[in-house]
Amino acid sequence: MTAAVHALNRVGIRPRLRRRELGLLIIVSVALTVGWISYVSFRDGRLELADTAILTTYLVALFVIHGLFVISGRRMDEILFPTAAMLAGISLLMMQRLPQDLVTQNVAGNELGLGQLQLFWIVLGFSLLTAIALLVRSDGWLRRYKYTWAAAGIFLLLLVFIFGDVTGGARLTLRIGPVSGQPSELLKVILVVFLAGYLAENRRALSESSTRVGPIRLPPLPYLLPMLAMLGIALAIVIIQSDLGAALLYFLVFLGLLYVATRRISYVVLGMGLFLLGSFVLYELVPRVQERIDIWLNPWADAQGAGYQIIRGLYAYGRGGILGTGIGAGLPQVGSIPSIPAIHTDFIFAGISEELGMLGALALLGLYLVIAERGFRIAAFAVDDFRSLLATGLTLVIVVQAAIIAGGNLRVVPLTGITLPLVSYGGSSLLVNGAVIGLLLALSDRGVEPPVPGVPRGVRQRLGRRARALGGRVESALS
Amino acid sequence: MTENNSGFVPEQPDSRPLDATRSRLDPRRLRVHLRVRPRLDARGQTPHLSPVSANRPPRIAGSLLRLSIALALVYGTLGGGLLYWQVMQAHSLTTDAANPIVLAAARDAPRGTIYASNGDVLAENAAGNQRQRQYPYEVAAPVVGYNSTIFGTAGLEKSYDAQLTGLGSLNGADDLLRKFQALAYNPSDLHTSLDISLQESASELLGDQHGAVVAIEPATGRVLALVSSPTYDPNKVVDPRQGRSYVASLQSNTDSPLLNRATQGLYVPGSVFKIVTATAGLSSGSITPDTTYADQPGEIQTGFLVDGFRIHDFPRKVQTDHPLDFYEATEVSDNIWFAHAGLATGPMNLLQWASAYGFGQRIPFELPTSPSQVTDGGGSFGGFQDRVELANAAYGQAEVLVTPLQMALVAATIANHGLEMQPKLVDYLQASDGTVTQMPSKPLTQVCDASVASVIGQAMQQAVEGQYGKAFAGAAKVPGVPTAGKSGTAQLGGNAAPHSWFIGYAPADNPKIAIAVIVEGGGAGSQRAVPLAGQLMSEYLAENP
């Protein structure tokens, strides 16, 4: 053991035990195994643990990732990863429990069902998480080229706008060859990067007040304009694509970041005012918005049509009660028809609330609050404003998105289609949210220690210099 | 503004000498970990460099704290949403007719059976077709209702739908425990208090005439018979071949066979309401059993003039030459005496004690009920329009409207020493796993003192058995058993034949059955309702001595 450690030390890697993470991962494993036993026992009518291939694969992946974290020796947060692992584990259990033919894909002659596909995406997402957590040691590539990133993101959205496929009444999916994805998921991260970069640079000016409009004090408008323009373009495109959930998310994250950077409540009030005004205009102009608000106010007015999904979701809550029916004992399908449309994506929260009950759903919400606590802690301890704001934005992206869709499921706010981060089925969502957690982990390493000597730097530095030179030219042209 | 482009490690060393030493034991390093609110300002900047540094932007950590509070509120709201739907609304959502689990239960689980008190089946699943119900006793339709795949449910089939399908029990803890059992549905059988032979007799005696009969066990509130005439054949309603046309014909029928007259029919009560007036008058002390009105004998000829309106009594064979007391006035059903008594009692007292009986509210019951009323309300005279309305209401005319169920409860309350029991149809539920849930009797209201009830009971016995009372209500007498009651003839105005009413109970000294009978357009109380009630009470007491 010590020999191995010495060997690692010689190549510049100093392993660092992560006892808290290990302990939490063991708890996660036990909880998921108990859940699996509960599900399989209910399905087969006797106490047993069967069909464990998916569960085992997942748990092994978790501990492999933990091992990599240990070997890397980075001083990263030890709670974020187990929390994400629990969320994704619940997701895996639910996807295995739902009718497998909800989503199928033929991969190399094998017909893969919902559970297997979700496992694939989770492992892929967590691989991305690990890669980012371990390899990202510099944030220059994020902070320096914020305009480039923003332009790339909007370009991506434009591609969807022109070439995208329509799913569920919204133009969301971009298909390139066999690969398809939903770029609005990626854009949320790009937007956060841009906002963090811009606000870190200009937050002093923004938090001062120089312009007065009646009782409202405004900052110098030129400082607000680039940000508003970027947000406006993104919002306009997603609204045209009827991706209302994403639009709401962008807007709330924008307001949250603006507040954190300036601590000026007048921005929030003004933003909410604009939001209400915008909602009113959209209600009048866009039939889809009108429909969403109408079914929110009274889903029973069209119980067999527009309100069908939300009413079916409410039935699931009622059936679940306090303790839930137990995994596998709910009624997500009648015959072969899912009882709630989109139960594996937009309505997974209702499905979980049915089978794990109010207590289970509260615990699930609690996991997002843990992410919020860790993310904000990382932000508070970050070494400069950019990283603080970046960590805040990345955290908000996850917890606000979870609140939007859970609130929509619960009829607390109008329903807008968006995934429950790390839980809903879907490749784009899992990859992007995995990347977000990975970035938060990388940011949590405060880099107290200097880069380990002995890492080959020559090639990397040369490549880096060339990339920066190219990026710099693009960036200056854009800004 | 200096910017830190190179990586996570700041190129400029932190202004504090934090990184100068790297010892794990350095107390300054420990301080970093213990610090709750790090100072994030001025980092990466040289404080003395900029003149605006006095105007630093706010610290991000402070903003984060406020953002956290906002976020906690948002998540708290979500938790509130969960609480609302999963606890507060859970039962109504789970038993909603459109809920797929209700449909699934109807398909997967056999529905429970409904029994009469003697064990006869009132509703069961048809042999060979679990989804269709059959109803051996058509006369029980106002109680049992129907369960149709097309028209939904009515009657007990509706109010106990969740228990019959086994989706919910009356005990929340059972629902929790069921999660640990293999059987997802646990349908219950209903065992009712309905005496099916009494129900059949009442229906036969009403014959083609419209009306209603309600019989109650006074001490418990158990409903023994609940007849509404005309009624419908639930077997035809649930028959998929002829259901639609049959229901259409019922709906267009002007005799309203779908209306449950016993619980929802509103009738002018006439003299049977005098029992309510007497309760209010005696309880409030406005009258006593010995109260007489000196003008009353004379007014039999001239009428009783109240604010320009003359109240008359019916011309009757039995006349007296002295002022009547309460017993005599009840025995001969003297409207003028009760008009006086009503005015003496006053609007507030009359409404208060009527409300104690259940007037003005829906009586809590397993079938839908309509509220009975003493007045339309809104008038300036304590809710009445004027003294004339109050005087007329005191003997059951004016705007008084009652359900037969309400009047049966009035009789049962007097029989039960002034304590009104909540009416109920189901004695107990037996779940398919053998669990028995008793439905206990519940006292509803202590309407009046036992002494008041005893005085009224004595007057009611006199009204059936007394020298003069016999002429009105003697036919209600159960042979060999002391019987109490009050007949009524509800005037409807114009040339319409009056409703024939009777309420009463027997045996008067140990009441086992209280009854209310109304025959629409049946003429004077003595013509139809009184003998009908007498025969039903005789039959019941012969079977249940």
Image (cartoon, coloured by chain):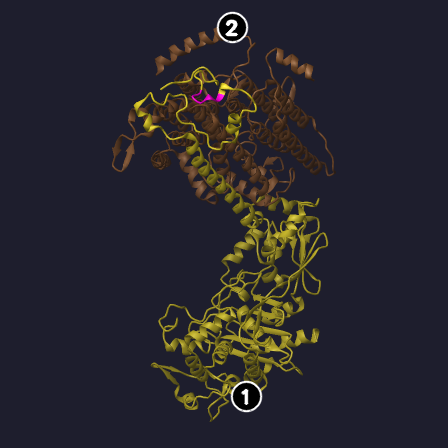
For disc 1, the marked residue is: B468
Residue A201 in the image: above or below residue B70: above
| Front-lying residue, A253 or A446 | A446
Q: Position of residue B73 (x, y in %)?
A: 46, 41
**Which mark, by number, is residue B201?**
none
Q: Position of residue A67 (x, y in %)?
A: 64, 21
For disc 2, the marked residue is: A458
Is residue B15 magenta-colored? yes
Q: Which residues are magenta?
A: B14-18
Residue A432 in the image: above or below residue A307: above
Q: Which chain is disc 2 placed on?
A: A
Query: Relative to residue B495, is residue B544 drawn left or right?
Result: right
Name chain A's colour: brown
In the picture, which quadrant includes the C terminus of chain A? top left
| Residue B362 visible at all | yes
For badge 2, the amino acid type reads Gly
For badge 1, the amino acid type reads Tyr
| Residue A306 visible at all | no
Instruction: Describe the element under mark 1 as helix, strand or loop.
Output: loop
Residue in the picture at 51% in, 26% down: B28
- All told, the count of numbered labels is 2
Q: Which chain wears yellow?
A: B
Asked if marks 2 and 1 fall on the same chain, the answer is no
**Which is the main secondary structure of the residues drawn in magenta?**
loop
